[in-house]
Image (spheres, rainbow, N blue to C red):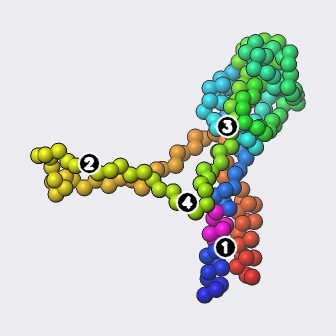
Amino acid sequence: MAMMVKAVFVAVVAVAALAQLTVAVDHPVGGSGATWSTSGGYDSWSAKQKFSPGDSLVFSYSPAHDVVEVSKADYDACTASKVVASYTGGSTKVKLTTAGKRYFICSIAGHCDAGMKLQVNVAAATAAPTKPRGQRSVAPVAAPVPAPEGSATDEQLPTVSSPTGTQAPSSPSGSGAASISASAAVVLAMGMAVALAM
């Protein structure tokens, strides 16, 4: 019996840890298979993405281009007078470490004006709501209201049930949606097996 309780406890802890696991996402700029080029459209792509601290932007581009992180003013003016960081080489991975807006352009003359500019908004990490210890969470419930005279009784009304949950939104192809890697799943399974063997 004690072994069964221990196994259930380990399984519950593993599921709770898995729920807390945050996986960083690599976002290919422009979408899967896209390249950093004068074709533009990067801000509309960016608006459809969810960027979180720990994620990365992955730029793929020809040697005729570069990636320059700039200030908001430089982004708006398509200039690189206040360079935050500059990258060359055809493949660049930029880690998004903190929440806030980030701005990128190609500094080659005319390229930014032709559409090689990107702004991303890195969302702040959300913490689980906390409550003081010992207090229970209770959803507010509206007080019953008496039915007006002459209205239908409970026996005359149809039975209606409400859904108990909502379906998770599906992820569009090429959005950079993450899943737990196979190695993380193996490590979790091994940890559970070791705990059960004790």
| Sequence order check, earlier mark of 3 and 1 | 1
> Any mark on residue 145, and which?
2
Whether residue 89 is visible here, answered yes or no, is yes
Q: In terms of secondary structure, where does tag 1 sit?
A: helix
SS assignment for the magenta stretch, majority = helix
Closer to the camera in the image, 129 or 34: 129
Residue position for label 3:
123
Q: Point out the stretch of residues depicted in magenta.
A: 10-16
Q: Earlier in the sequence, mark 2 or mark 4?
A: 4
- Say which quarter of the image contains residue 101: top right
What is the quadrant of residue 93 in the picture?
top right
Tell me where residue 174 appears, x and y as whole percent.
Answer: 64, 39
Amino acid type at circle 3 is Ala
Residue type at mark 4: give it. Gln
**Residue for point 80% across, 36% down:** 94
> Does 13 appear in magenta?
yes
Q: How many marks?
A: 4
Disc 2 secondary structure class: loop
Provide the residue designation for mark 4.
135
